Image (cartoon, grey):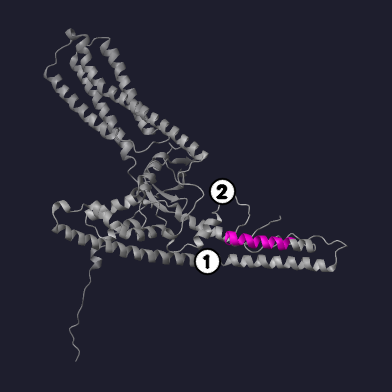
Amino acid sequence: MDTESTYSGYSYYSGRSRGSHRHGERSRDRDRHKSRNKDSRSEKSVTINTPPAEPLLGDSSVRGEQVQDDNWGETTTAVTGTSEHSLSQEDIVRITKDLEDSVGLDCRRYFTLTLAVILGLLVFLTPLAFLVLPYILWPEKLQTCGTACEGLFISVAFKLLILLLAVWALFFRSPRAGLPRVFVFRALLAVLVLLFVMSYWLFYGVRILDTQDENYQGIVQYAVSLVDALLFIHYLAIVLLELRQLQPCFSVSVMRSTDGEKRHYNLGQLSIQRAALAILEHYYCDFPVHNPALLSASKSRAAKHLAGLKVYNVDGEFPASPADGPGNNAAAGMAHSQSRAMIAAAARRRDTSHNELYYEEAEHERRVRKRKARLVVAVEEAFTHIKRMQEEDQKKTPGDVMDPREAAQAIFPSMARALQKYLRTTKQQHCHSMESIQQHLAFCITNNMTPKAFLESYLSAGPTLQYSRNHWLARQWTLISEASVTSGLSDGSIFQLKCVDFSLVVTTKKIPYIQMSEEYIDPKSHKFVLRLQSETSV
């Protein structure tokens, strides 16, 4: 396959020499390349066929990394291809889809809540209806039961109150997430309660309403038995929904697909969708925030490596014709061997790329340490200034004392430049806004924290919930699993939690059965006798 490449100040074409016309074309190409180099400042580019999976970074970003100095934030202007707030057609389609999905989730949530409220009213009004209907339909036929019925009334009242509080504590809680499928155990319990109440109503209509039973004490006991059965069903709900999952049965490994960050958790008997929900709750608290800027370093090195490669055409050896002399054949052979030698040199350069990586990382660590030292000194000086201001405020009148926010705004400019440079070097500038930094500084001043406590949020990456709500609030996750999401976890099951920027790959392993044995040690075996000889040395 023929490959053509354009390089800074150099262009090579393999083939046979065709006279002065070919020589003139090469001269014009060389002059054109020289003029282009003066305009583009040694821009390197190479045309290759890359797989459509993930495009490499452009050469402009590589050049920006090469010429970046310590004061690039104040001395240069970064120009990007697309604006941060620009919208493409794909973005509009994705936003429309997200809105439709959110409307569907809201409708399903309210529909489920409506069904739960209707079922709850049916459950709590049924015992009361059993007690009231006989007094409304046939009051003259009822037998008085006296003190026994009054005691049963008190029992029914307190049991219903206990049941109401228990149902409110277990079921009527704010939803933590919207799951793709129905929670199987909760649906089974709802069906069980509905069938149970309907069977009680059927028996009540056939045996009491049709016959107009006169034994009111029996009717009251019938209502008490219904309340007792509902309490037992609620106990069953606690066992299935809460207690069953407490005992750890599986060890899950969660790995982030972009940077390989990994955590391990122990889970109980859960369905795949419930396990995914538990993993996401742990993710927001345990995993450091996802920083896509840190991943661009490897892509930048790959782009730099590809820009440094020179691709030559080694297929320029034409078959010799009788008209060609021995000189042309010798020139073609020399060009062919020269191309082979240059390709071998490029391969040797590729083998030494680990040295470039080593020195790049060492240089980056040196810059980070230097800017960290500058930041620490600037923050300590700012907090020392705060202490002086506090001592001066004690001598002033109460009306002239500065509040913590005003003090934070007063000392923030002294540390802003060092903090900005450090955040840019560590690629954290998108995680912290000026407003959030000032709020954190005011918080530290209010609680009399040290400079080290203030810097802890910026020197090391924290969990996702530590940052602004834009990093986690409106993020929608997609559960990808070969098995049904309502099925339980099993040994070796694998599923993914995918969002826009990355995915979490979850691997499940069952905790093995542990066999323990006991070994008895006789307490007398630890006793020793010390025998002293009475003879003394002379």
The residue tagged with tag 1: helix, strand or loop? helix
Residue 310 in view, yes or no: no
Magenta segment boundaries in residue numbering: 25-42
**Which residue sits furthest top?**
140
Q: Does residue 244 lie above or below 140 as drawn?
A: below
Q: Does residue 228 lie above or below 59 as drawn?
A: above
In x, y percent, where is residue 181?
Answer: 42, 34
Tell me which amino acid carries mark 1.
Glu
- Please rate how many residues cluster around mark 1, counting C-alpha atoms within 10 Å: few if below 14, some from 14 to 19, many from 20: few
| Residue at 25 percent of width and 21 percent of height | 125
Instruction: Check the picture and name the quadrant holding the N terminus.
Output: bottom right
The residue tagged with tag 2: helix, strand or loop? loop
Residue that mark 1 sits on: 356
Residue that mark 2 sits on: 53
Say whether residue 32 is magenta.
Answer: yes
Tell me which amino acid carries mark 2.
Ala
Instruction: Check the picture and name the quadrant holding the C terminus.
Output: bottom left
Mark positioned earlier in the residue sequence (2 or 1): 2
Residue 141 in view, yes or no: yes
55, 27: nearer the viewer: 27
